Amino acid sequence: MRKNNPVIEAYGTIDELNALLGMVRSALQPDFASMADEIRVIQNNLHTECAFLASMQSDEESPALGENHVEWLEDRCDSYQEQLPQINYFILPGGTSRAALLHFARTVCRRAERKVVAAAGTFDFPEVNIMYLNRLSDLMYLMARYVNQQSGIGDEQIQYE
């Protein structure tokens, strides 16, 4: 398979996201150790998604994500959301370096989602893999806001000038 094949593009981008999350996890230590532990779980799940894409099979032998993985992300989103003030505006990515890394990872995750959608037409591809990346980017957004909040930095609203 050529390096520009949509499937290789997809799992290459997920691999890039996983490496970036390794940087995020390192940056979160020791102050946000429980969040770093959540990132470790996510990294393992992303490796599973890469393995599934690399095998291009959907049988019981190949590793795969399931609805339970998406539900775990949704549970984590709810947990962080409950601890954050409601906002109804777009925010600038940034704040602390940790939050900025999470925002960067969120954008790479969105790109990975687009690549997976492009690859999905090439073989029997479960929708749960796309849902996982979609919810993961939401979680990273909330994690970034949480890290900033815990660091005493509020959300910075975008100014349209």
Image (tube, helix red, strand yellow):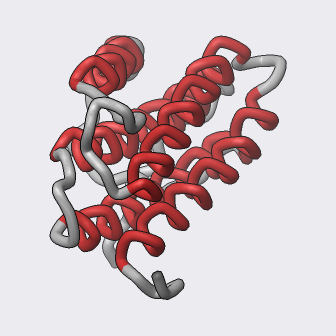
Q: Position of residue 133 (x, y in %)?
A: 34, 46
- Residue 2 appears in view: yes
Frontmost residue, 69 versus 89 = 69
Q: Position of residue 64 (x, y in %)?
A: 35, 35
Quadrant hosting residue 53: bottom left
Name the residue located 50 percent from the left edge and 41 percent from the top edge: 46
**158 relative position to 23: left or right:** left
Up-down: is 95 above or below 78? below
Frontmost residue, 37 versus 138 = 37
Q: Position of residue 56 (x, y in %)?
A: 34, 57
Frontmost residue, 148 versus 137 = 137
Name the residue located 46 percent from the left edge and 58 percent from the top edge: 54
**158 relative position to 105: left or right:** left
Name the residue located 51 percent from the left edge and 65 percent from the top edge: 13
Frontmost residue, 100 versus 74 = 74
**15 relative position to 122: left or right:** right
How many marks on residues?
0
- Residue 85 appears in view: no
Name the residue located 27 percent from the left edge and 18 percent from the top edge: 68
Up-down: is 87 above or below 120? above
Quadrant hosting residue 71: top left
- In the rendered image, the quadrant that contains the C terminus is bottom left
